[in-house]
Amino acid sequence: MSSEEVGIVAQRKAGLEEWYKALIPALVEFVGNLGISPAHGVQNARTMLDPFEVAKTYVDTPVPRRLQLLLDDVDVELLATRND
């Protein structure tokens, strides 16, 4: 990496915590605007699931792949953390 790229990475890392702290309230407001109640339920970090990780899992699965099976697994995982 060039020194400029290293500087950009360092700058982004420095702002990551502040960005993450702002993310949750914005997410709660967004969910509330969608009409989902209780909107504050998204604050429970245990139920947070990285959609990019789910997408990566799907893309990395050999063909033929079944999206519904993956989504069913996601539902099971989310329901399990909800019942804890």
Image (cartoon, rainbow, N blue to C red):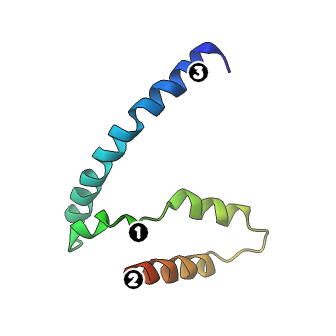
Quick one: SS at disc 3?
Answer: helix
Q: Which residue is mark 1?
A: 46
Vertical comparison of 57 with 82: above or below: above
Q: Residue at x 46, y 83 (%)?
A: 80
What distance separates the C-alpha of mark 1 from that of mark 3? 32 Å
**Residue 84, numbered label:** 2
Question: Sequence-wise, which precedes: disc 1 or disc 3?
Answer: 3
Question: On the rendered structure, is 26 left or right of 7?
Answer: left
Q: Are marks 1 and 2 in contact (CB under 8 Å)?
A: yes
Disc 1 residue crowd, few under 14, some 14–19, many 20+, Cα 10 Å: few
Q: Which residue is mark 3?
A: 6
Q: Give the mark count.
A: 3
The kind of residue tagged 1 is: Arg
Location of the C terminus (image quadrant): bottom left
* Residue toward you, 6 or 56: 6
Question: On the rendered structure, is 10 left or right of 45?
Answer: right
The kind of residue tagged 3 is: Val
Q: Position of residue 77 (x, y in %)?
A: 51, 79
Q: Position of residue 29 (x, y in %)?
A: 21, 57
The kind of residue tagged 2 is: Asp
Disc 2 residue crowd, few under 14, some 14–19, many 20+, Cα 10 Å: few
Question: On the rendered structure, is 58 left or right of 9?
Answer: right
Vertical comparison of 54 with 68: above or below: above
